[in-house]
Amino acid sequence: MKIVVLDGYTENPGDLSWEAMKQLGELTVYDRTAPEQIISRIGEAEAVIINKTPLSRETLEACPHIRYIGVLATGYNVVDVAAASEKGIAVTNIPTYGTAAVAQFAIALLLEITSRVGHHARAVREGRWEHSRDWCFWDYPLIELAGKTMGIIGFGRIGRTTAGIAQALGMKVLACDNFHDLSLETDTCRYASRQDVLALSDVIVLHCPLLPETQGMICRESIARMKDGVILINNARGPLIVEDDLAEALNSGKVAGAGLDVVSTEPIRSDNPLLRAKNCYITPHISWAPRESRQRLMDIAVGNLRAFAEGTPVNVINS
């Protein structure tokens, strides 16, 4: 089987190995592939492995040897799944590899907003503590999380893991999800409607998928229902937020701070209003990227391809 990886660098910048995948066939790995190179690089490959390289209907029609597409991510919107299904091409994804990493990063964004560790560490290096007239100083209000309420929209594996960390910090959790597992409710964690999450939370964390009903869910109208001074964390999907509306709320102080690992268009564009908004921390979509998480992703990707080759496919999203 001929296998081609079109954009392997993000998954493996050099600290992992493709050796296990190489055992499954004739493997070619490209770090990056420009749009005009996609068809020629696929060539006669039967298995195409991608992260964010788009595979359109036109590409699939131009590459008739493809039998398998493996997406090195959970989201698979870069693939024309309908066209793949019509052509009998199996499309797989990696559904659960970064649960701990993404939850950890959500809390890291929150702690940066509440404790301003990065800012004050830079201030010390710049000599401000050395020359301070007082024995300590702080430039921003520092916020204690114990006793505050975190609302989590999307209470799957990641949401539940984030909730566990929040409760360890002394927070109460309001969970919003279409599915309720009442066995998870405790004195410090209970299910709530989205409206209650918006109205009652000191911190709102988005861990939900991007669906027609969730796109733009954080907007001027929903922000108006939130507490003054709420903190918003999003390391799920950028289009969950109407960015102009959030920027306005940050600049007015209605939202005290936002920690975002995702934006509507990635990489971020220079005209994104959040780049100029107050108290907005934006990181380059790296919640998933610890080596441990990427190794898990690699192992699952190899397992997906092996299962397909053996006639027992798993994690197929168009079965």
Image (cartoon, rainbow, N blue to C red):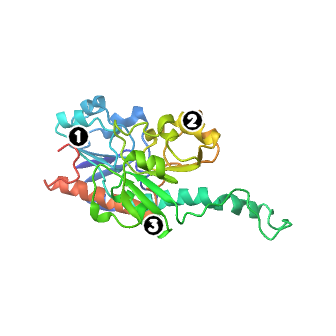
Judged from the image, the secondary structure of the residue bearing numbered disc 2 is loop
Cα separation between marks 3 and 2:
34 Å
Say which label, 1 or 2, has the lower sequence index.
Answer: 1
1 or 3: mark nearer the eye? 3
Say which label, 3 or 2, has the lower sequence index.
Answer: 3
Which residue has dot 1 on it? 66
Q: Are marks 3 and 2 in contact (CB under 8 Å)?
A: no
Q: Amino acid at mark 3?
A: Gln
Q: Residue at x 23, y 34 (%)?
A: 82
Q: Residue at x 28, y 65 (%)?
A: 183
Q: Is residue 54 visible?
A: yes
Left or right? Give the position of 257 relative to 261: right
Q: Is residue 277 visible?
A: no
Of 19 and 294, the residue lying toward us: 294
Q: Are marks 1 and 2 in contact (CB under 8 Å)?
A: no
Q: Amino acid at mark 1?
A: Ile
Which residue has dot 3 on it? 167
